[in-house]
Image: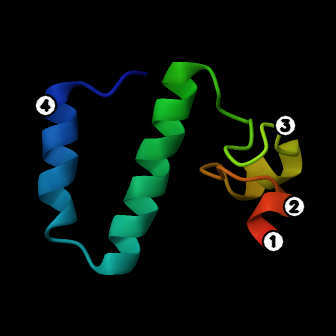
Amino acid sequence: MQIDHGTRSWLVSRQRALPESDVCALAEVVGAIERIDAGTYGRCTGCGAMIAPLRLRVLPAAALCVSCAAT
C-alpha cells in the first residue's frame, strides 16, 4: 500500500492536531508502511537482521530488532 501525496498531506495536517505521543505513534506507522512499500518491512533498520515475528506481532511498526532497540 503506497501512501499518495494527498494521504501524506492529510497525515501531516492531522499531526498538528494530535498530542506529541500520538504524533510519534503515527510516524511509526507511516514508517512501517514505507518499509512495506520498499520491501524492507521486518528487517532491522539498525543492523539489517530479521526482526523476530513475535516482536512484530506485539509491535507491528517496530523498526529495530530487540538487540538494536536495547542499545
What residue sits right under mark 3 in the picture?
Answer: 50
Q: Are marks 2 and 1 in contact (CB under 8 Å)?
A: yes
**Above or below, comparing residue 5 to residue 23 in the picture:** above
Q: Nearer the viewer, mark 3 or mark 4?
A: 3
Residue that appears at 48% across and 54% down: 28
Look at the numbered disc 4 and give the secondary structure of its residue: helix
Look at the numbered disc 1 and give the secondary structure of its residue: helix
What residue sits right under mark 4 in the picture?
Answer: 6
Residue that appears at 50% across and 22% down: 37
**Above or below, comparing residue 45 to residue 24 in the picture:** above
What residue sits right under mark 2 in the picture?
Answer: 67
Q: Tell me if mark 1 has few (under 14), some (14-19) or many (20+) residues whose alpha carbon lies within 10 angstroms of its own.
A: few
Calculate the distance from the C-alpha at mark 2 to the C-alpha at mark 4. Answer: 36 Å
Along the polypeptide, which appears first: circle 3 or circle 4?
A: 4
Q: Which mark is residue 70?
A: 1
Calculate the distance from the C-alpha at mark 3 to the C-alpha at mark 2. Answer: 11 Å
Inspect the image, locate mark 3, and give the three-letter code of the amino acid beneath it.
Answer: Met
